[in-house]
Image: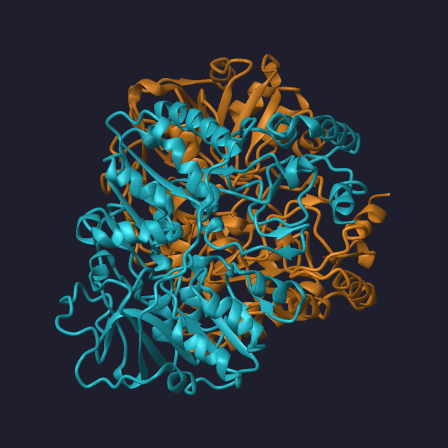
Chain colours: A cyan, B orange
Amino acid sequence: MGVGDGPVEAPEGERIADGLTVVDPAEAAAEVGPEETVLVSGFGGVGYPKAVPEALAADGRAKALTVVSGGGVGDEIDTQLFESGSMARRYPFQTKPASREAINSGTVGFHDRHISRVADELRYGGLVDADTAIVEAVSVGEDWLVPSTSIGNTPAFVEAADRLIVEVNAAQPRSLSAVHDVYTRKKPPQREPIPLVDPVGRIGSPEIGFAPSKLVAVVETDRPDDPYTFREPTGIDREIAAHLASFLSAEIERNPLLGARVPLQFGVGSTGNALLEALSAVEFGDREVVYFGEVIQDGLLDMLDAGALAGASATSLALSADGQERFFASIERYAEEVVLRPADVSNAPGLIDRFGVVGVNSAVEVDLYGNANATHVGGTHVVNGIGGGGDFNRNCPIGIVALPSTAAGGEISRVVPMVPHVDHTEHDHSVVVTEHGVADLRGLSPRERAVALVEVADPAFRGDLRAYRERAERGGGNVPHDLETALSWHVEWGE
Amino acid sequence: MGVGDGPVEAPEGERIADGLTVVDPAEAAAEVGPEETVLVSGFGGVGYPKAVPEALAADGRAKALTVVSGGGVGDEIDTQLFESGSMARRYPFQTKPASREAINSGTVGFHDRHISRVADELRYGGLVDADTAIVEAVSVGEDWLVPSTSIGNTPAFVEAADRLIVEVNAAQPRSLSAVHDVYTRKKPPQREPIPLVDPVGRIGSPEIGFAPSKLVAVVETDRPDDPYTFREPTGIDREIAAHLASFLSAEIERNPLLGARVPLQFGVGSTGNALLEALSAVEFGDREVVYFGEVIQDGLLDMLDAGALAGASATSLALSADGQERFFASIERYAEEVVLRPADVSNAPGLIDRFGVVGVNSAVEVDLYGNANATHVGGTHVVNGIGGGGDFNRNCPIGIVALPSTAAGGEISRVVPMVPHVDHTEHDHSVVVTEHGVADLRGLSPRERAVALVEVADPAFRGDLRAYRERAERGGGNVPHDLETALSWHVEWGE
């Protein structure tokens, strides 16, 4: 397979190697059985296959597909395949209204697993038995392909699937090969320490290898990604960013872990992108600032262009359309500082811990003791999935949950007595930041945490939170709760 | 400091090096201020300092100590210091009625953090500012000590504290040095991959180094540990073990991760020890079976003696008194197969993941979607703390939660609609086992998980669980809940 055996020569010549036959998307889609398990490339809304899923949805034969992606993908998969009634299951992350609605209505099954674990589970079984991988590439040969704007879990997908369909997308620059670093972890007991000592170092090759017999179809497309649109930062985003900047400024001065290098990670989406603004207000001095996260967002390009970032490691170029254009225009230059890795490397618990990453992730809500719900509104209705939030929150020495103190125009508090769904426990992250300040939970008892967290809640809810705290403490316990009313706010909001 | 720079010569001569002055425990205790932060050795109820904490409790000056241990310690610390009113805070794990009561009444603050994270947090700040470390050793020199029956976070404690008091315990064999492998992780950005490729390999030295100026007192003791007493396995333990054995037998046949080597971890305590019996019923064939966990319990000695285990790695010899006697009588022989490491190595997320450990841990209760409460009865009253349960559950490719289906003589179900405290989320572990069978949650949607988990609940509660499930599903959602009644079982049990 050649993967992980060291760098492979960058492929020369045409995007599609001589000897490979190109078929139209409908013909490729016909290779997929109506109840198959299909693994699709894509992460952060980019690098996903477009023409074959669309053809599959149009074809209408598929009735009960299981679709597994690395992370977020586009409408061809998470809208069209859902609306065509083709879906039975969807793992482990999605971002579209159609997929969300089908999952929350119970018509499509969802399995919400930490991103870092999915590659092993596909390779070695337990999650699904994979049939066909459909993968977007910038070039393909008899036994290799070069991924496009994301890597995600594509190396594991290509390995785990029986058959492989490759979409070669002419809208994705071929020179994207310059940013890829595909390292494949061996199977235990042969598995070695991931040999990455520099967060933005390189240990792999630009290509993903595969057994030639797997390749059943090659399709040509010429369609750009339809990536996330980042909203403009709001006033509240800016207030959160200012508090985050104050915290980081003080922390880098006092924490020996950050004395020489500050490795950062920011969560996927508009909030994460907006909070990158915080970094411009931090005096890093002569510390090296690097990004070791899951996705490259637009804010990171600004920092790279300004010379404020020594480099960035992720698994996806989750840029806006404008950001992609900017990146594509200067790939060779950016490739000196940007590297994309498989998601089981970008999100590896051992690396996050080894590098000492400072992670900033959002949540739907936090409770008085610091538990965070990052996935399920009302405790029941999934938004996107946990993604890599748990990989980072749990393994960062300094995990920060950053969120506005309210939702629904101030009607709903995001600091609540008890979260009705827990994705990050009180044992995981260290700090909660809202537009009202910083609650540094390190070394605090649960009762002290509750006092600190009330202070970062919206003032309109602080009285009720204090009343809950006092009522709860009457029952005693290390983590006091009044179970009769712990979820009453959510009951009321749900009515 | 010499730590982590490679093997150091095993110390020769007397237990206490020439030139060091021995003082009595009261004199050593007088070195500790009344509101200090004190770091004590000890993990799994063994290797903790005995005489100085006892003298500190008898002295009565201490009024507001913060005491941080690696894991569980003895009565001299968690009973006497609590009963003498010396305590203000206790981190991050305790096991005694006196400590538990003080924490649950809110008079002593508790901070419940993953074991693997504590070493870094002590070294680099954030958790506490440490004053004095009190450490049990089998021998001590001017700038080194050899720990006794546990390592835990002692290397970090010795590094983080300003002052060091060493108790040299003549009841602990000096030859315990043969089992110790102290590897100290460097501070990022110099931190390297932990160079352990064999779960029972050695990468460090038997000693912990320290700056000579830190050593303020050496005390001699001659008192054995007062370790856990394991209860005899119950009939229910044996039924759980039988289901666990069935699962493991099938899994090793189908899972390529376990094709050549089966690395196992079992949780601390009687349930964990009892479940080790399951392994005698599994046909491992020519697979190498190794233990990579947190504590060595009696059941592992049986396996080592029977040749059923190639080796065992942990941070503590959490043996019964009989088990210690048996181990001490043949240390040199056991040392060929047994190694103790610092807790940030024994529990390192990167190693658990790298080796592909199969972890078996218990819980207070699980809910219909697989979330587990491992720490707080009724969601409020702490038992012991999370310890290393999260380190393993979260990073094991196959994490198994094993628990009896009921408590309180069958009056209380341990499978509940919603757990009121979450330590291990639905995203973490893979399998739940009770005396009624195995719920393999891999690849299941939350609604499917609920069906599977009802089947491993006690039959007396299955009807009510199904009724909850149906009521919850009427509200829709990926994780259906009826928030008005989600915690009603706990409310009733608490009355």
Can you tell which quarter of the image residue A277 is in? top left
Q: Residue at x 16, y 74 (%)?
A: A14
Front residue (pair A43, B251): A43
Figure label count = 0
Can you tell which quarter of the image residue B53 is in? top right
Front residue (pair B373, A482): A482
Q: Residue at x 23, y 67 (%)?
A: A207
Residue A295 % position (x, y): 37, 51
Residue A465 % position (x, y): 71, 30
Q: Residue at x 51, y 61 (%)?
A: A94
Residue B16 falls left or right of residue A76: left
Q: In the rendered image of this protein, does residue B463 appear above or below residue B493?
A: below
Viewport quadrant of the C terminus of chain B: top right
Residue B126 falls left or right of residue A381: left
Residue A199 % position (x, y): 27, 46
Q: In the rendered image of this protein, does residue A9 appear above or below residue B227?
A: below
Asked whether residue B331 appears in the rendered view, the answer is: no
Can you tell which quarter of the image residue B89 is in? top right
Asked whether residue B102 appears in the rendered view, the answer is: yes
Q: In the rendered image of this protein, does residue B35 appear above or below residue B319?
A: above
Viewport quadrant of the N terminus of chain B: top left
Residue B150 % position (x, y): 45, 41
Residue A149 falls left or right of residue B269: left
Residue B482 falls left or right of residue A114: right
Front residue (pair B161, A488): A488
